[in-house]
């Protein structure tokens, strides 16, 4: 598909949709109105400024805006209106309630004294109202209705809190009501300054994205809803530098800044700070996550090394999926049907009783494959998996609770289970495997002032094996049981020493226990880690950050316990408000998986009955290592509704773990009595000797220039090179797409219509894969598989049938030409879905 033509048509669509009044990106648009209002108030134009603040609040309620409105009325000398808005702010239960009550008491006394002193004071005659057109009256009524609903939503928020805002232009009392978070990835932190983008993953604390030491992308709940996405991983295509590779509807791989592969293993995925990395295999089972898209508050993507804070496997970055805090949200029913026998439905409920809050969700989904791996009438192949057509089927449930003893002292407990069947594409000569079983987890968080504790349990219990196997061939079907127990403690303390410091010190322990036939039984490992981080602000515009973490692994020292060290240093300069320059240097690592360390598996040689190739693990593997340098600039123009981020990076990677070439065995060792097969050769996991260098530049841009239009653009250029390998056989070099582009727009009208379209372009690649030689199937060769550039085009049209109650939508997925994203993957075709969302 012609990529420039796609964006040209998207631009024409944007121009056509720009007429009329609407709501765009909520945060950007609300922030634009808020900043304009504050500027007008500072100039003494109180009525116009207050109107802007009210419009910001109707778009995205933030309790501190109520305070700003009250203070503006007070500065304008209008005590009665100020009193009314102070009361609305107090109804949001801010932490500064006592001081606000005192202000209200003074205002009430002032108003009463004024009325008593002038009981018969003549009032100025009200100006004759101008005749309003029916359209103006309707618009005014709609605005009043939206404002009342926004205030009602804010008043429904239970008390919690962080220290409040300091907004330029009007001095504010410290205090604001926000959902209390248990752990660094709990409730959304709205922050002191209204509509400032906040992240928690980059430094394990809530902070402005301008202060983050890494390149950061945030995908909001509104982004998710308007995209019409049916899977989590599809949302990540909009992230600059993200490489999303889908082999099937339930099998996807994600990498950041190169080095993607089947069983992608270099990005750490978290759900509310709990790892979803499957240690036995070294991948994230995206289709097995026990959460619904409707539960997600935001997704934070940290591009660049994260091992200094998160340890092993955060080598190329971190994806933290942050769900809505218990008790904060609307009850919701969502249903979707469409092509490929797609059916899904979910129910999410929120509630609170005094200091106890909860979120409960249940859901079901199913979806057929895009294409079949083998023809159904082949007499030589036998189906081993649950279904030849189904790519995913599952039912899930999730419960999260929080209890607040007092501000800063919280306890959170959550658990979930997912019964599913899906597929995965392993390494080497193996093709798609079915996975049929369940995943489950339990998690606890406790906040005790400056000390936070977190513990979780992850469980996997699945039957798995090749979905199709030649009839008469020894089967590779197996069963895997994995249990991971993790405990962590984090201490945070601020102090003054040559400037402001924020010190974080933590320790972590993890027990992994895996039972798997491919490893010859049950294996167990215990890992431990300690980390420290100091954020120092020696002068106002400069922030310096230093992090260090040491991880103990039981095999890192040539099969004995050893340490992996992960330092990071960063400098962030904020010379003027809304602009930040950053520079960082860090190292990161990925530890060997159970598969890479312990495997002992005879893989049948394709087309040769009675012959197998032996694949073995290696307990003396070194961890994969990366040294990274990054320079970035992040800026915003709130009055124009624009955010942008630019990043330049260089990553040097060594000790990559890969399978060796097949080595012939001596004649006396070439027969295996246990399997009664001839062993044609042996391959094993090893550290590659080559060093790879990835260089690139990334750009992300978000715009809400006018009411109604939201635009997101991202691009990434990258090149992976090596000095020790021929470029024609360098897998990491040719498999990384050099150009990735994303463009998306949304338009939301006040006539209850929503439009959205996005397109992603990925340049061509060449995949170097292990395949049997055509002349001799017992010999394995590395074959180059060219893959053409492709475009993914998605669109959504929604309509709010009943305001705030019922929304219907039509979603088009993969509307561009059919394509494959990996030589062994499904051919991806377009599908159309219809969805309905009910808010009881």
Image: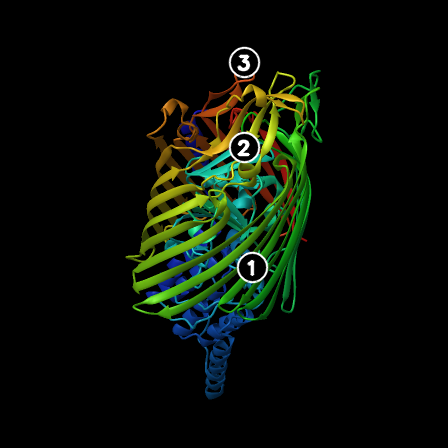
270 over 788 or under it: above or below: below
Crowding near pointer 3: few (<14 within 10 Å), some, many (20+)?
Answer: few
- Mark 1 or mark 3, which has the lower sequence index? 1
Crowding near pointer 2: few (<14 within 10 Å), some, many (20+)?
Answer: many
Residue 347 x %, y %: 68, 49
**Hey, which residue is sitting farthest front in the picture?**
668
Q: Which residue is mark 3?
A: 776
Structural distance between the alpha carbons of marks 1 and 3: 54 Å
Tell me the element at label 1. Answer: strand
Tell me the element at label 3. Answer: loop
- Mark 2 or mark 3, which has the lower sequence index? 2
**Hey, which residue is sitting farthest top in the picture?**
775
Residue at the location (50% across, 38% down)?
A: 254
Residue 697 x %, y %: 34, 39
Q: Which residue is mark 1?
A: 454
Structural distance between the alpha carbons of marks 2 and 1: 33 Å
Q: Which residue is mark 2?
A: 246
Residue at the location (36% across, 39% down)?
A: 652
């Amino acid at each position: 598909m012609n990529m420039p033509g796609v964006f040209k048509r998207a631009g024409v669509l944007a121009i056509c949709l720009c007429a009329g009044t609407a709501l765009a990106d909520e945060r950007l648009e609300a922030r634009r109105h808020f900043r304009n209002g504050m500027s007008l108030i500072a100039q003494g134009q109180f009525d116009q400024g207050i109107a802007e603040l009210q419009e910001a609040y109707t778009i995205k309620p933030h309790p501190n805006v109520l305070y700003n409105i009250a203070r503006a009325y007070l500065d304008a000398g209008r005590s009665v209106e100020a009193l009314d808005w102070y009361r609305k702010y107090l109804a949001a239960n801010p932490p500064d309630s006592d001081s606000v009550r005192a202000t209200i008491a003074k205002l009430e006394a002032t108003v009463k004294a004024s009325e008593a002193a002038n009981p018969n004071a003549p009032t100025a005659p009200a100006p004759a109202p101008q005749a309003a057109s029916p359209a103006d009256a309707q618009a005014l009524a709609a605005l009043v209705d939206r404002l009342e609903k926004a205030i009602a939503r804010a008043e429904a928020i239970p008390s919690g809190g962080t220290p409040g805002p300091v907004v330029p232009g009007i001095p504010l009392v410290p205090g604001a009501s926000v959902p209390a978070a248990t752990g660094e990835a709990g409730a959304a932190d709205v922050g002191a300054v209204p509509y400032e983008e906040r992240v928690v993953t980059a430094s394990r604390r809530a902070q402005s994205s301008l202060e983050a030491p890494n390149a950061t992308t945030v995908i909001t709940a509104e982004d998710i809803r308007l995209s019409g996405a049916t899977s989590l991983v599809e949302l990540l295509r909009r992230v600059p530098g993200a490489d999303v590779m889908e082999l099937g509807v339930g099998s996807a791989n994600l990498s950041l800044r190169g080095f993607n592969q089947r069983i992608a293993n270099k990005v750490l995925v978290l759900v509310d700070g709990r790892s979803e990395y499957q240690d036995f295999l070294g991948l994230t089972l995206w289709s097995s996550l026990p959460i619904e898209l409707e539960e997600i508050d935001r997704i934070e993507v940290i591009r660049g090394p994260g091992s200094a804070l998160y340890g092993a496997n955060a080598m190329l970055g971190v994806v933290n999926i942050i769900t809505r805090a218990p008790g904060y949200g609307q009850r919701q029913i969502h249903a979707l049907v469409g092509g490929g026998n797609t059916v899904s439905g979910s129910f999410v409920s929120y509630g609170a009783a005094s200091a106890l809050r909860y979120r409960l969700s249940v859901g079901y989904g199913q979806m057929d494959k895009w294409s079949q791996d083998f023809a159904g009438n082949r007499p030589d192949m036998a189906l081993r998996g649950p279904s030849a057509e189904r790519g995913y089927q599952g039912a899930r449930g999730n419960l999260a609770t929080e209890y607040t003893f007092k501000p800063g002292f919280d306890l959170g407990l959550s658990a979930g289970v997912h019964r599913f069947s899906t597929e995965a594409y392993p390494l080497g000569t193996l093709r798609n495997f079915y996975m049929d079983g369940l995943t489950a987890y339990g998690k606890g968080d406790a906040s005790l002032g400056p000390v936070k504790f977190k513990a979780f349990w992850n469980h996997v219990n699945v039957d798995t094996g090749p979905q199709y196997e030649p009839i008469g061939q020894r089967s590779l079907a197996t069963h895997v049981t994995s249990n991971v127990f993790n405990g962590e403690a984090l201490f945070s303390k601020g102090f003054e020493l040559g400037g402001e410091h924020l010190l974080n010190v933590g320790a972590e322990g993890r027990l992994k226990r895996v039972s798997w036939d491919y490893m010859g039984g049950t294996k167990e490992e215990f890992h431990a880690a300690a980390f420290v981080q100091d954020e120092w602000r020696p002068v106002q515009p400069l922030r310096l950050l230093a992090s260090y973490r040491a991880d103990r692994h039981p095999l890192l020292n040539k099969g004995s316990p050893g340490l992996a060290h992960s330092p990071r240093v960063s400098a962030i300069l904020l010379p003027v408000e809304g602009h930040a320059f950053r520079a960082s240097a860090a190292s990161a690592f990925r530890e060997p998986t159970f598969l890479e360390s312990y495997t002992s598996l005879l893989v049948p040689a394709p087309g040769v009955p009675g012959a197998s190739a032996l694949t073995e693990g290696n307990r003396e593997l070194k961890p994969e290592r990366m040294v990274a340098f990054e320079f970035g600039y992040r800026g915003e123009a709130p009055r124009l509704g624009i955010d942008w981020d630019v990043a330049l990076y260089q990553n040097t990677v060594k000790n990559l773990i890969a399978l060796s070439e097949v080595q012939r065995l001596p004649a006396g060792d070439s027969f295996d009595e246990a399997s009664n097969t001839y062993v044609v050769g042996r391959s094993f996991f090893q550290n590659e000797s080559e060093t790879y260098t990835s260089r690139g530049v990334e750009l992300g841009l978000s715009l809400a220039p006018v009411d109604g239009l939201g635009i997101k653009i991202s691009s990434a250029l990258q090149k992976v090179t090596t000095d020790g390998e021929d470029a024609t056989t360098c897998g990491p070099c040719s498999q990384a797409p050099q150009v990735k582009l994303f463009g998306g727009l949304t338009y939301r009208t006040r006539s209850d219509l929503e439009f959205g379209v996005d397109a992603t372009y990925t340049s061509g690649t060449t995949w170097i894969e292990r395949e049997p030689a055509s002349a001799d199937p017992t010999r394995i060769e590395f074959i180059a598989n060219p893959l053409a550039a492709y475009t993914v085009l998605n669109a959504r049209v929604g309509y709010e049938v009943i305001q705030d109650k019922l929304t219907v939508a039509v979603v088009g997925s993969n509307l561009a030409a059919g394509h494959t994203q990996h030589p062994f993957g499904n051919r991806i075709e377009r599908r159309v879905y219809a969805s309905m969302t009910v808010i009881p």
